[in-house]
Image: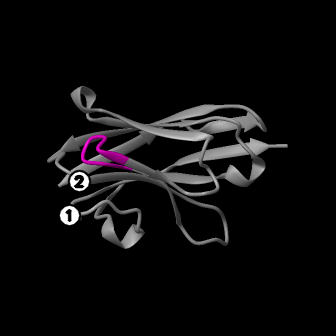
Amino acid sequence: QVQLVESGGGSVQAGGSLKLSCAASGKTYSTNVGWFRQAPGKEREGVARIYRGGISTAYADSVKGRFTITQDNAKNTVYLQMNSLKPEDTAMYYCAASVFPFATLVPAHFTYWGQGTQVTVSS
């Protein structure tokens, strides 16, 4: 079992930055750790993922060049640095962990989920 706790959300103006953290505890082994977001009335979408501690990363097209996912293995924490935020980035952001054997950002491949942290970007 893996427990995930997100932090770092908040309210910022467009163009601002936030850094989300996802702290893992318990049986922390995972192959993929991903960040997902869900806005009201929309489906949950994958934002970014890191595979096997950094072998590879991947991003949704909508955040490429603005968001960066990193992992600190010593702290069992994954971060999502979000720059140049836009109002359309407003959503609840979730961290999730997967034991799927390959690199993935498909929500169904992720077993463990945090409770989420709200990000609100105003214009």
Quadrant of the image containing the N terminus: bottom left
Residue 34 placement (x, y as % from top left)? 40, 53
Secondary structure of residue under mark 2:
loop
Q: Are marks 1 and 2 in contact (CB under 8 Å)?
A: yes
Whichever of labels 1 and 2 marks the residue nearer the N terminus, that label is 2
Residue 34 seen anywhere in this rendered image of the structure = yes
Q: Quadrant of residue 37?
A: bottom right
The answer to if 49 sits in the magenta stretch is: no
Q: Amino acid at mark 2?
A: Thr
Question: Residue at point 41% right, 68% down?
Answer: 107
**For mark 2, does the 10 Å Cα neighbourhood hold few (<14), some (14 to 19), or many (20 or more) residues?**
some
Mark 1, Cα crowd under 10 Å, few <14 / some 14-19 / many 20+, is: few
Residue at the extreme right: 123
Name the residue at 22% across, 41% down.
Answer: 25
Give amino acid for label 1.
Pro
The answer to whether one can see residue 115 in this image is: no
Of residue 93 and residue 35, the one placed in the foreground of this image is: 35
Q: Is residue 64 left or right of residue 78?
A: right
Q: Residue at position x 67%, y 72% from top?
A: 41
Residue at x-position 61% and y-position 42%: 65
Q: How many marks?
A: 2
What residue is pinned by disc 1?
A: 101
Left or right side of 118 for 25? left
Task: Tell me the SS state at disc 1.
Answer: loop
Residue 54 highlighted magenta (yes or no): yes
* Magenta-tinted stretch: 50-56
Q: Position of residue 7 (x, y in %)?
A: 47, 37
Image quarter of the C terminus: top right
Q: Is residue 62 left or right of residue 110?
A: right
Residue 117 or 74: which is nearer the viewer?
74
Position of residue 54 relative to residue 31, above or below, is: above
Using the image, tell me which numbered label, if any, was put on residue 31: 2
